[in-house]
Amino acid sequence: MNIKVYPNEDAVAGEAAAIIADAARAAVTSRGRFIMALSGGRTPWLMLRALAARELPWGRVHVFQVDERLAPTGDPDRNFAHLRASLLDHAPLLPEHVHAMPVEAAELDRAAEQYARTLREVAGLPPVLDLIHLGLGPDGHTASLVPGDPVLDVTAADVAVTGPYQGRRRMTLTFPIINRARLVLWLVTGREKAEALVRLRDGDRSIPGSRVSQKGALVLADRAAAARLGTEEKLEA
């Protein structure tokens, strides 16, 4: 796992946008399209606004969600509402290349299977994402893979529905598809994440984040989140 530290969340967001843009251009050149999955969070919205301003082969970009709360369309708790406001309303993505999680379906398990089918149609069998962006919670959760949830142990499905967490059930990608991604890009900002970041670096299997493969993973952290890392890791990029 490679950890790079930046002065603040704006710098983290800007560097993340540059990394995604480079990955998109390389993927389109090599494979004809770029397939990414995005998580929610304040710093990611800054990242996506910066990304939307870049010149990219947008017609060949596919966007999936890493996770989504089970809430009605337009609910401010929905990641997709912020994804639209930060990226989709500003970048010339093709509507059919934007894949929202079907969290309003009456049969959620069937909806999760439907989303998994869409992933296979776009990203192959088994589906391989070019880039997946993850965040890290103070409790060590990532995506909507939270401590104690049975979804942590799902190995035969790429999409699943969780139990309640902070008042909402969620639909989430699972570890198998996350660990097949060509690049896992972590954004970790805020002092409340400092202990979790150390545990992630150390591969502490008691937190869900450490079940994500560290091979080829890149962490962009701000100074606050990196406060408990060793001196050699605090060197700013």
Image (cartoon, rainbow, N blue to C red):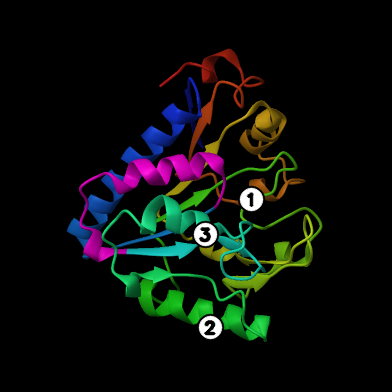
Magenta highlight: main SS: helix
Reading the image, the residue beneath label 2 is 114
Q: Which residues are magenta?
A: 40-61
State the separation of the CA atoms marked 1 and 2. Answer: 22 Å
State the separation of the CA atoms marked 1 and 3. Answer: 20 Å
Sequence-first disc among 2 and 3:
3
Say whether residue 149 is magenta: no
User: Residue drawn 69% across and 35% down?
Assistant: 196
Q: Give the residue type that dot 1 points to.
A: Thr
Question: Which one is closest to the eye, mark 1 or mark 3?
Answer: 3
Number of marks in picture: 3
Secondary structure of residue under mark 2: helix
Secondary structure of residue under mark 3: helix
Position of residue 184 measured from the top left corner of the image (x, y, whole percent): 47, 49
| Residues at discs 2 and 3 in contact (Cβ within 8 Å) | no
Reading the image, the residue beneath label 1 is 142
User: Residue drawn 32% across and 53% down?
Assistant: 90
Sequence-first disc among 1 and 3:
3
**Camera sees residue 111:** yes
Q: Which dot marks residue 81? A: 3
Q: Is the residue 162 above or below the residue 6 in the image?
A: below
Q: Give the residue type that dot 3 points to.
A: Ala
Q: Give the residue type that dot 2 points to.
A: Gln
**Mark 1 surroundings: few (<14), some (14-19) or many (≥20) residues within 10 A:** many
State the separation of the CA atoms marked 2 and 3. Answer: 21 Å
Position of residue 167 measured from the top left corner of the image (x, y, whole percent): 79, 59
